[in-house]
Amino acid sequence: MTQVRSRDTGWALYKQLLGYVKPHWVSFLVAIVGYAIYAASSTALAEMMKRLIDGIQSPDAAFRLLLPLFVVFMFAARGLGTFLGTYFMSNVARNVVHALRCNVFNHMLHLPGRFFDSHSSGHLVSRVTYHVEQVTGAATNAITILLREGLFVLGLLSYLLWTNWMLTLLFLAVTPLIGGVVSYASKRFRRISQRIQDSMGDVTHVASEALTGYRVVRTHGAEEYEKARFARASDYNRQQKMKEALTKAVSTPVIQLLIAVSLALLVWLAMSPALLDNMTPGEFVAFITAASLMAKPVRQLTEINSEIQKGIAAAGELFGLLQEPVEPDSGTREPARLQGRIQLRNVSFRYAEDQPEVLKHIDLMIEPGEMVAIVGRSGSGKTTLTGLLPRFYRPTAGEVLIDGVPIDQYRLSPLREQIALVSQQVTLFNASVANNIAYGVPEAERDSIKAAATAAYAHEFIDRLPDGYDTIVGDNGVMLSGGQRQRLAIARAIFKDAPLLILDEATSALDTESERYIQRALEEVCRGRTTLVIAHRLSTIERADRILVMEQGRIVEQGSHAELLAHNGAYAALHRLQFQEDVAS
């Protein structure tokens, strides 16, 4: 599978991510102020130690009163700073994640059909769920620790420089070594994080396929095969997670050891007689306290590196996806209700440059209100041909016209509003029957919904459901039979009242009785509409105005049912073959 990745550097990606913070700059500013208060009050601990030691040597009444008040004020300020920083930064971060998640989802809804053909649904769902949560780590925990502990470290460094700048510079001599370790760990974290994200997509994909198709899995006795497939995907994810844990487990102690060595050197130097002579006992204790306090924030700052790198790797995937071009919609024409005249002029189509042509030089004219059936063997290009009308695909050569206008000149959304589609793979949503029929029309009138259901011969079985039209149908209509799902999909197409109707194997899932009902419904629905019917069972399209026979991307025959049988060509051969199959069954 082709991976969508941004090639930007880590800093460029992080800047893009921080761009989502701009609308929430007030909360961000309050959080920074809160962390500044936290850093200042925490740094004051060293100053408190200095005054405590010096005050013990020369105590007075004022000192005895002020020092406890100073302690209370310092911890109160620290608590206030922690609250302001944590709450308002979380507010910013969750808004950032919400905006990013919605942007990614909204963008995917407008990507062309070819994108979905080349990406599994499991990997795409993983981007909206797992990848965005990785960004949460970089946008929430990482920024929180970066600001809180970063400002604390700056405060401590300032205090150390103010107390004894020479010792502080010696203490900072170890910084380049720490920087080297962090740099190496960053690159490794980011590389491993990308593999983890890919493997999570594989885990989601395998699980989704096996659980959705559980009937096929069980009837084929493929439980062990699917268990092994899932275990392989999960084990690869585990391996990458362990590599990440190993990198983190090694880099953090190494950095802590470097800090400990520098602290030990600092203590040894600070205790030299020459330096002790120039410092009061309070200053000496304050200096050592401030230096010791740096260990915890520096450790936390190095530990967030893995979170930041995971977030940057996930951001690379997400921003790469957001850079994918959406469906082209350069049309400016707002169609009124279409008459339904369809014309294809020398149309050819291939799915990719290196793929063979699926459609080859198709010339076709369909008059308004005409019912045209398309038949042929699997892979002959029937579904691809009808997919050109709602612009799921764009022809690689030639042009498609509706009512004499090239379809590229129509605005995409209004064009699709005038096309109803019922496919072999029925899609129902985990909502009520009424909401599935009136999909996309939240405030639809119940009478209109019932009229559409009645026309599709669905009202009778809907009325017998526990809650009638308010019955929840389950995931993809799992609570309904195949025929009932198909009739609901046809009711949805009838409710839409579109002038163009595409029926892609719409009666394939029906029993004989349901098919008879649907045939009557379709005859009623097709009146006054241009209808394209893709049919496998030839008995369902005998009354079509015209039948097209396709082979290997070409229209090889066309005419009425009687004409094509009399011609004794490809259609007659298909008809004889199906008749023999029906007799045998």
Image (spheres, rainbow, N blue to C red):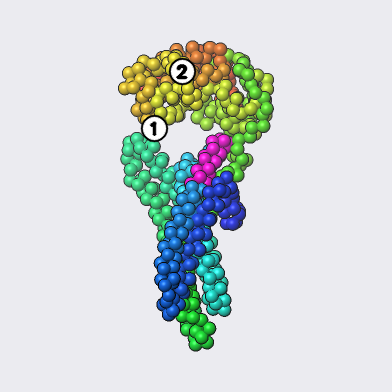
Relative depth, front residue between 538 and 455 = 455
Residue tagged 2: 445
Q: Residue at x 63, y 34 (%)?
A: 328
Q: Residue 49, percent across and down?
A: 44, 73
Relative depth, front residue between 101 and 538 = 101
Q: Residue 93, percent across and down?
A: 50, 49
Q: Residue at x 53, y 56 (%)?
A: 33
Q: Residue at x 35, y 37 (%)?
A: 214
Using the image, determine if residue 108 lies above or below residue 255.
Answer: above
Alpha carbons under labels 2 and 1: distance apart? 24 Å
Dominant secondary structure (helix, strand or loop) of the stretch shown in magenta: helix
Closer to the camera: disc 2 or disc 1? 2
Q: Residue 21, percent across and down?
A: 56, 48
Is disc 1 placed on a helix, strand or loop? Answer: helix
> Magenta segment, which residues?
93-115
- Residue 181 falls within the magenta-colored stretch: no
Is disc 2 placed on a helix, strand or loop? Answer: loop
Q: Quadrant of the C terminus?
A: top left
Q: Which residue occupies the extreme front position in the image?
A: 61
Query: From the viewer's perspective, is 213 left or right of 171?
Result: left
Q: Amino acid at mark 2?
A: Glu
Using the image, determine if residue 64 lies above or below residue 498.
Answer: below
Q: Amino acid at mark 1?
A: Asp
Using the image, determine if residue 176 lies above or below residue 436.
Answer: below
Q: Residue 531, percent across and down?
A: 55, 18
Q: Which mark is residue 475?
A: 1
